[in-house]
Image (spheres, helix red, strand yellow):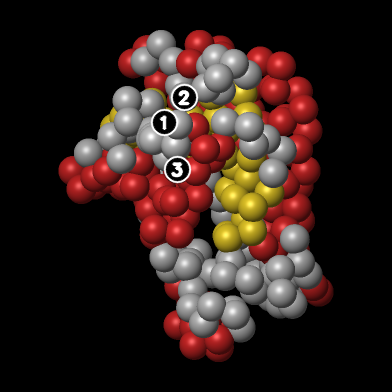
Amino acid sequence: MTDGLFDVSGKVALVTGGTSGIGEMIAAGLVEAGARVYVSSRKADACAAAESEHGVVGIPADLSSEDECLRLAAELGDRSDRLHLLVNNAGATWGAPLEEFPAHAWDKVLDLNVKAPFFLTRAFLPLLEAAASVDDPARVINIGSIDGLRVPELPNYSYSASKAAVHQLTRVLARDLGPKHVTVNAIAPGPFPSKMMRATLEAAGDEIAESSPLGRIGKASDVVGTTRFLAGAAGSYVTGAVIPLDGGIWTTR
């Protein structure tokens, strides 16, 4: 009865922003587990590199616009008649002092971090429904952040606000898509090695690791394991959840 709880073999998945950082970790882990994985990135060369290194299928797309979200859905739909798992990972950040924080930093970050997951989920809904059943729902996983759960230490006003919005959007979509047999959950990572976190970890990596009760930052197996839990049979009755993946940094502070 417990065999295959984390099995995702044969499932079709899309990981946006899947050519670097947490998205790349998730995409590579799903391929290793036997899923057929598509990734998107703004950069065609990054998609080509991911195809070569991880065996994914890359589709370049700038998801900061609704038109590109729709094009990505249409192009993937030409290649597959269903989608079992949509991972909305593509994101941007911006840091600046309050007095200097520019208006375009709000537009850039909210367009990609909040609007794109909404537009993509809506655009892919027919493919998700085609893959869904009562016992094995299709899955949407939004990548949030512990900075959307806590007051962040850095002045990333638009980023932390966007991730809080992602968490609430996850709950709202979970309610609306549940009757269609589509679950919607969010993973809220803490510090992981990624391009977005590189400068911060170089400056204060040891201090950040020590702030966790577990004494380290995240690694690929942590986020891959959580993704496979939500995407496999083990997570088929979980929806509307926001899972902190931070080694206890937020939950114990």
Among the two numbered marks 1 and 2 on one chain, the one whose residue lies closer to the N terminus:
1
Front tag of 3 and 1: 3
Residues at circles 1 and 2 in contact by the CB criterion of under 8 Å: yes
Seen in the picture, residue 111 relative to 210 is either above or below; the reply is: above
Among the two numbered marks 3 and 2 on one chain, the one whose residue lies closer to the N terminus:
2
The residues tagged by marks 3 and 2 sit, at their Cα atoms, a distance apart of 12 Å
Residue position marked by numbered label 3 in the rendering: 228
Q: Nearer the viewer, residue 127 or 114?
A: 127
Residue at horizontal 41 percent and vertical 65 percent from the top? 219
- Look at label 2 and name its amino acid: His
Residue at horizontal 38 percent and vertical 53 percent from the top? 25
Residue 127 in view = no
- Look at label 3 and name its amino acid: Arg
Residue position marked by numbered label 1 in the rendering: 13
Q: Quadrant of residue 126?
A: top right
- Look at label 1 and name its amino acid: Ala
- Is residue 154 left or right of 69 when viewed as pictured? right
